[in-house]
Image (tube, grey):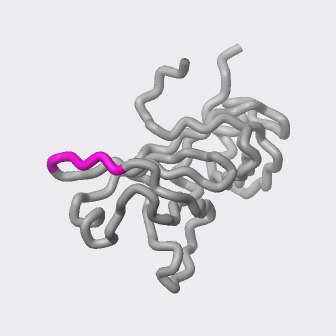
Amino acid sequence: MQKVSARNQLVGKVSAIFEGSVNNEVIVTLDNGDELVTVITKQSCSTLDIAIGTKVMAIIKAPWVVLASPDCQWQFSARNQFEGTITSVMEGAVNSTIHFTTSKGLTLCAVVTNESVEGMGLEKGKDILGLVKASSIILATEKH
């Protein structure tokens, strides 16, 4: 079991790397077939020995997952967009934890304000769109 505090820990393999002058765009194909687009520095790619085929863990903190209604009529710039169905809503004093699952079985966790839960009518069984910026994904590799 991984010992990382972030709730979204997604395992996959690097399927493509597009090099830039400072940052690289790294595409990760998750074990369930979904793809993630990440942006990390060239230095991090080098330090972590990231190459095509490298096994990685993509780490996404729950507050970095933005929720939207799939029928909101807006297009978003976030590279990672996951449509799913809410499986649980756990309300706290200020924030709520929302778990949702995509049609391919990817489960993600988001933390939003209680006002957002009420305003968006978030409840178990409701369809939702989870948005994650490419720069909000941290990649980790196994130690050798």
In depth, the one of 50 and 90 nearer the eye is 90
On the image, the x and y values in percent for residue 20 come to 73, 57
* Horizontal relation, residue 84 to residue 121: left or right: right
Reply yes or no: does residue 90 show up in magenta. yes
Percent position (x, y) of residue 111?
Answer: 35, 51
- Residue at x 46%, y 55% (from the top left corner): 86
| Residue 54 lies in quadrant | top right
Whether residue 23 appears in this view of the structure is: no
In the picture, measured across the screen, residue 131 lies left or right of residue 55, that is left
- Pick out the residue farthest to the left: 93
Counting labels gives 0
Q: Residue 141: give x, y in percent of width and height.
A: 66, 28
Say which of 120 and 45 sits in front.
120
Most frequent secondary structure within the magenta stretch: strand
Magenta span has 64?
no
Place of residue 66 in the rendered image (x, y in percent of width and height, measured from the top left): 43, 61
Work out which quarter of the rendered image holds the N terminus and state it. top right
Q: Quadrant of the C terminus?
A: top right
**26 and 129: which one is in front?**
129
The magenta segment is 89-93
On the rendered structure, is 14 left or right of 121? right
